[in-house]
Image: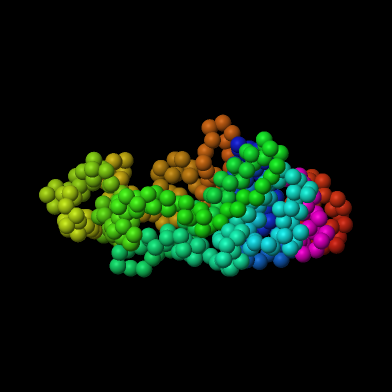
């Protein structure tokens, strides 16, 4: 797929001011669904330890280098904005305003522009100007507190809950909602996507359960956090792991049958017996290898699955059949998701070299004096 050629968002034009983490992931999702995304990079790339050609979050884009510290670079960026439907930025509050690329600056050339802002703390509030990372954002929302063993510390869930779940997904949702509204009103607006807001939203189910007494406000004591023996992970004889999620009675009965446990020992109606059940499950799983247990449970309703590593996941038969992972430019990575029955997303294209598309994009998008910008170093063609 070349950026913007296929998918349900084909024809949507987006300018992305280069950043790291949740902003680029949101841009990747939009590009995967067919949007034409132009990523405006800095003359000297900073902030990422991943080589550009292997940075999966930069796939399906076109790359332009502009010096936004120079007024001429800002004017060139505004000419791109004038042709766009969406701008995405992930700087601290006030940075784009100081550059001359804030919402008012952009609306002066394009009143219908949707201005997507990705931050950790949001555009306002006591911490709005403070630095932060995923772990801090999910810490103050209560999400991190809920993760981990009852007798241990909170365990960071990589950066999936904050950056990508609470950040990128909510930015994408907000941008698409604002585009829907702008198509009718002809007016753009700011989408303030704060990770603390999104991560808090993700805990909605837990708050509802907490209010009704179905959730205890402590780790490892609940239905979905490993507090119940039938929703947890267990070591196998080869040092690997199996994941068990047999919540419903009929699924639990199937688990007990396939593990060949004594039904009397496995009776889960009395919470006082749960430690004994956990020991029985642990002993059973420890008697065979992960692959042996995977074969036993494959295709059953016991809700048991092998815990695979990132490298192993692409080889799982179900994921392989669905082509859930693809190889792009020699890098194995997730395929575009979700899937569409008619306006299908194509195969991703590799991340471009920095500035690979500068001349082509600036020319195609109607930016004035492209040669002058390149000759002066305000724009850079790789």
Residue in front for this viewpoint, 298 or 148: 148
Q: Quadrant of the N terminus?
A: top right
Residue in front for this viewpoint, 191 or 51: 191
Residue in front for this viewpoint, 325 or 266: 266
Residue 360 in picture, x, y percent from top left = 78, 48
Residue 120 lies in quadrant = bottom right
**Residue in the image at 71% along x and 66% along y:** 44
Residue 381 in picture, x, y percent from top left = 78, 57
**Residue in the image at 54% along x and 35% along y:** 340
Q: Which residues are magenta?
A: 64-84
Residue 232 visible (yes or no):
no
Residue 77 lies in quadrant = bottom right
Does 69 sit left or right of 318 as displayed? right
Residue 250 in picture, x, y percent from top left = 23, 40
Q: Residue 247: say if magenta.
A: no
Does 107 appear above or below 129? Answer: above
Does 144 appear above or below 193? Answer: below
**Residue in the image at 50% along x and 62% along y:** 137
Does 86 sit left or right of 237 as displayed? right
Residue 133 visible (yes or no):
yes
Does 291 sit left or right of 310 as displayed? left
């Amino acid at each position: 797929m070349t950026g913007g050629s296929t998918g349900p968002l084909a024809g949507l034009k987006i300018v992305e001011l280069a950043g790291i983490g949740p902003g680029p992931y949101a841009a990747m999702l939009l590009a995967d669904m067919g949007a034409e995304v132009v990523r405006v990079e800095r003359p000297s790339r900073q902030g990422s330890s991943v080589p550009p050609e292997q940075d999966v979050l930069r796939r399906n884009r076109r790359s332009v280098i502009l010096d936004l510290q120079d007024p001429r670079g800002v004017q060139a960026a505004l000419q791109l904005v004038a042709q766009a439907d969406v701008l995405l930025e992930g700087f601290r509050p006030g940075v784009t305003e100081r550059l001359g690329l804030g919402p008012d600056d952009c609306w002066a050339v394009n009143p219908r522009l949707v201005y997507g802002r990705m931050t950790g703390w949001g555009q306002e509030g006591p911490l709005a100007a403070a630095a932060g990372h995923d772990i801090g954002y999910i810490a103050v929302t209560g999400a991190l507190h809920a993760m981990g063993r009852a007798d241990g510390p909170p365990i960071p869930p990589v950066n999936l809950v904050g950056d990508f779940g609470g950040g990128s997904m909510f930015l994408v949702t907000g941008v698409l909602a604002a585009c829907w509204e702008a198509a009718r009103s002809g007016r753009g607006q700011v989408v303030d996507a704060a990770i603390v807001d999104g991560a808090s939203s993700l805990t909605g189910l837990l708050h509802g359960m907490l209010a009704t007494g179905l959730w205890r406000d402590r780790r490892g004591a609940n239905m979905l956090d490993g507090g119940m023996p039938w929703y947890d992970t267990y070591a196998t004889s080869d040092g690997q792991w199996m994941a068990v999620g047999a919540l419903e009675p009929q699924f639990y009965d199937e688990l007990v049958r396939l593990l060949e446990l004594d039904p009397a020992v496995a009776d889960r109606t009395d919470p006082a017996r749960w430690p004994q059940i956990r020991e029985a499950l642990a002993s059973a799983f420890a008697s065979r290898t992960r692959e042996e247990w995977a074969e036993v449970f494959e295709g059953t309703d016991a809700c048991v699955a092998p815990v695979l590593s990132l490298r192993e996941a692409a080889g799982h038969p179900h994921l392989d059949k669905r082509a859930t992972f693809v190889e792009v430019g020699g890098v194995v990575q997730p395929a575009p998701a979700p899937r569409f029955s008619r306006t299908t997303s194509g195969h991703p294209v590799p991340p471009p070299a920095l500035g690979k598309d500068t001349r082509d994009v600036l020319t195609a998008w109607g930016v004035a004096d492209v040669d002058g910008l390149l000759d002066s170093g305000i724009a850079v063609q790789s």
